[in-house]
Amino acid sequence: MYYIRTQMDFIENIVVGTGVLGLAAARELQYINKEVLLIERSKHIFNETSSRNSEVIHSGLYYEQNTYKNLFCLEGKNRLYKYLKDRNIPYRRCGKLIISDGTKHQNNILDSLVKKAEEKELDYKNLSKKTLKNKYSFLRSGENIFIEDSGIFDSHSYGLSLLADFENSGGLINFGNEIDKFTKSKSKIILHFRNSEYKISCINLVICAGLGSINILQKSDFSMQLPDQVLNKGDYFSYSGKVKVNELIYPIPTEHSLGLHLTPGLDGRIKFGPDNEFVDTLDYKVSPEKKGDFLSQIRTYIPKIKLSEIHPDYSGIRPKIMIEGKIFKDFFPVFEKDGDVTVSSILGYESPGLTSSMAAGKYLMEVINGG
Ligand SMILES: Cc1cc2nc3c(=O)[nH]c(=O)nc-3n(C[C@H](O)[C@H](O)[C@H](O)COP(=O)(O)OP(=O)(O)OC[C@H]3O[C@@H](n4cnc5c(N)ncnc54)[C@H](O)[C@@H]3O)c2cc1C
């Protein structure tokens, strides 16, 4: 049940956005601080990036030590697996095979991934040529690493479950209203809506508006210097061929993405993606013209895949942070305390954002509570 209060003009804590980060943060805040209002511009949760991704639970292999991505992914993964199990939400700890195309460059990257797996004490194995041939006869035989701890899950059911926790503990939610900006007045933050004169005030504001978070902060009374944001689109193609596989199959990661990978759905259907392309607008169309490029990338690990077996599907857009002309590879938390009021957000909240959500949500709650 959703509560819509048109007369409410003050509530202690407001979270903007009901993607995975907003829901996780609002749930944590509601458990500790009480009095939380979630505001979402669309009519439902998971309106944007949270429903445009691979639904992979990442092991945390890739990320550099001492980064937020590493910290949140490792903690978030453990909390997420436990939560999914406790709540009977569909998931499969299927494991992930990362396979090199045999070039020296890729083999070197693979070696560094093996080192990382050891440093992080992740369970892994290297599959022999024979095992590869027997179990994955459709794959190119190459140096590889199999990470046991990766998985796939039903992220939408997870989002609905976070929402239910939030509401069952007294949290309030308001759909269909878009935040334009905020201003600070005395000891309160005043939120201004787009296309409405209505205003509401709070003390703690958490902005989890995904790709739009930075715009809200830029327009508002937020004095911290903000980085630039660029958009990086990832397209997916579905697969209609005969290959059946239960595990995730990844190529070697590239500069801006984890590589155009094979993800088996919980329903057995396979998809390939995402690629990565810097874009200027939020256009989610997937161009059939990319077929050839997808095919050549997939052929680096499935040599016999045919053009007729892949079909344009959906896409998602990553918010990438740019600092001094370079892509910043970590999440970018921002926080400002001014008298009694606090504003916080995590910019650049791209992959592994689903996996990290419980840890990142807890982090935002702790920031407000001085943790
Ligand atoms: C191609 C791709 C693949 C990915 N694959 C994975 C993966 O396999 N595993 C993984 O762990 N992570 C993955 N991620 C990352 C993950 O999907 C994101 O990190 C996460 O979903 C971002 O959640 P969010 O809550 O920050 O943003 P969103 O899900 O975009 O939510 C933002 C919400 O805020 C609302 N909103 C926006 N502006 C306003 C406003 N002004 N007022 C009110 N509401 C507003 C929107 O409607 C939306 O509901 C992937 C991302 C991409 C792009």
Image (cartoon, rainbow, N blue to C red):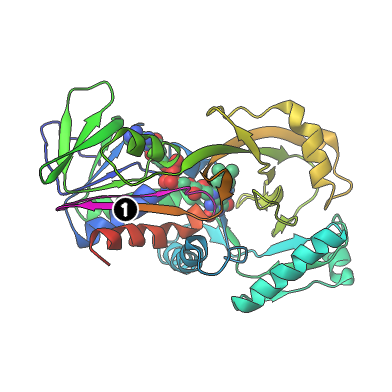
The residue positioned 43% from the left and 56% from the top of the image is: 357
346 falls in the magenta region: yes
Nearest to the observer: residue 241 or residue 80: 80
Q: Position of 175 compared to 82: left or right?
A: left
In the rendered structure, which segment of residues is drawn in magenta? 336-351
Q: Position of 26 compared to 61: left or right?
A: left
The residue positioned 32% from the left and 57% from the top of the image is: 364
Question: What number of labels is visible?
Answer: 1
Q: Residue 221 lies in what quarter of the image?
A: top left
Nearest to the observer: residue 172 or residue 120: 120
Q: What residue does disc 1 label? A: 335
Provide the major secondary structure of the magenta segment.
strand
Q: Secondary structure at mark 1?
A: strand
The outermost residue toward the top is: 195
How far across and how far down the image is residue 247, in percent? Answer: 69, 60
Nearest to the observer: residue 342 or residue 233: 342
Label 1: how many residues lie within 10 Å, few (<14), some (14-19) or many (20+)?
some
Q: Amino acid at mark 1?
A: Phe
The outermost residue toward the front is: 324
How far across and how far down the image is residue 325, in percent? Answer: 57, 43
Q: Quadrant of the N terminus?
A: top left
Q: Position of 338 compared to 364: left or right?
A: left
The residue positioned 13% from the left and 44% from the top of the image is: 188
209 falls in the magenta region: no
Q: Residue 236 lies in what quarter of the image?
A: top right
Nearest to the observer: residue 235 or residue 225: 225
How far across and how far down the image is residue 18, in percent? Answer: 36, 43
